[in-house]
Image (cartoon, rainbow, N blue to C red):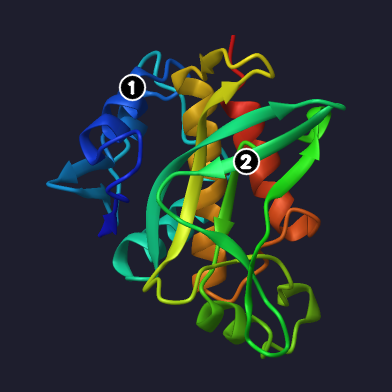
Amino acid sequence: MIPVNPKSKLTAKAWVDTVNAATCAPSWMKKIFTFRGTDFRIAPSYKFITGKGISKPPAWFGVWHTAASSVYMGSNWELTTGTLEMKPKDLSLMVPDGISIGKLDPDKNWTDFPQMQGHDKGEGGITVPTQDIKDNLNTQKDGKLHYSGVIVKPGSKQGEIVVVTQIKSVDGQLLSFGPNDVIETLFHELFHAGQIDQNKPNADSDTRFSAVTDGIKSFFACP
């Protein structure tokens, strides 16, 4: 199960509705996503039926589905939404719903750590581990799996998958992302979380990871 944060702008049902509204996602792909109560669900197997006019699964889908199924079958992650707030001086700030993200100093003191970037690099989502998940990554022999980024505030039982669903302009106007954009980010962040769960390449800078996420990006940029 993937529980949805109570403060997420999208309920479990609304997440599924958004998947179903994504015009780039074929019907067989949409069928793997369901919900039960407050939990978002991903079928651990999928059925693809060939036929006239039906495209085959994209090359990246099998690897992605294995990772996403790991998230669903485990208990390490929660799902929520976020807002990308545009700031003066060409900066943007990601504001996740229902969680605090930051870092611990060497004395274990907590500091909130806003995700501030330039407008041209505004985040569409972020996958934020717990301290325990971070510690596990940093024990791996493959140094590319090590993680030095933000974590969810201690006390949280699960890491957080954050998907930005709206932008807030400098003057306070809100603009919602369309279903294809939201679902592209959801697929991307689920892959982050699943790769982390499997102790596999999980960083955007790692070509072993980006080979899949580049495919996701292209797929959801359909006409």
Looking at the image, residue 133 sits to the left or right of residue 140; the answer is left
Q: Does residue 14 show up?
A: yes
Q: Secondary structure at mark 2?
A: strand
Tell me the residue that label 1 is attached to: 51
Residue name at image x 47 percent, y 32 percent: 183
Tell me the residue that label 2 is attached to: 94
Q: Quadrant of residue 216?
A: top right
Residue name at image x 58 percent, y 23 percent: 167
Q: Which x, y percent locates residue 9?
A: 35, 34
Residue name at image x 64 percent, y 30 percent: 85
Badge 1 amino acid:
Gly
Badge 1 crowding class, 10 Å Cα cut-off, few under 14, some 14 to 19, many 20 or more, is few
Q: Does residue 62 show up?
A: no
Q: Nearer the viewer, residue 129 or 101?
A: 101
Q: Which x, y percent locates residue 165?
A: 49, 29
Q: Which x, y percent locates residue 113?
A: 68, 59
Badge 2 amino acid:
Met
Q: Secondary structure at mark 1?
A: loop
- The image quadrant where one finds the N terminus is bottom left
Residue 204, placed above or below residue 82:
below
**Which circle's residue, 1 or 2, is located before the other in the chain?**
1
Q: Nearer the viewer, residue 27 or 78?
A: 78
Badge 2 crowding class, 10 Å Cα cut-off, few under 14, some 14 to 19, many 20 or more, is many
- The image quadrant where one finds the C terminus is top right
Depth check, mark 1 against mark 2: the one in front is 2
Residue name at image x 67 percent, y 51 percent: 114
Q: Which x, y percent locates residue 82?
A: 50, 38
Looking at the image, residue 116 sits to the left or right of residue 55; the answer is right
What is the CA distance from the residue labelled 1 to the residue labelled 2? 43 Å
Residue 4, placed above or below residue 21:
below
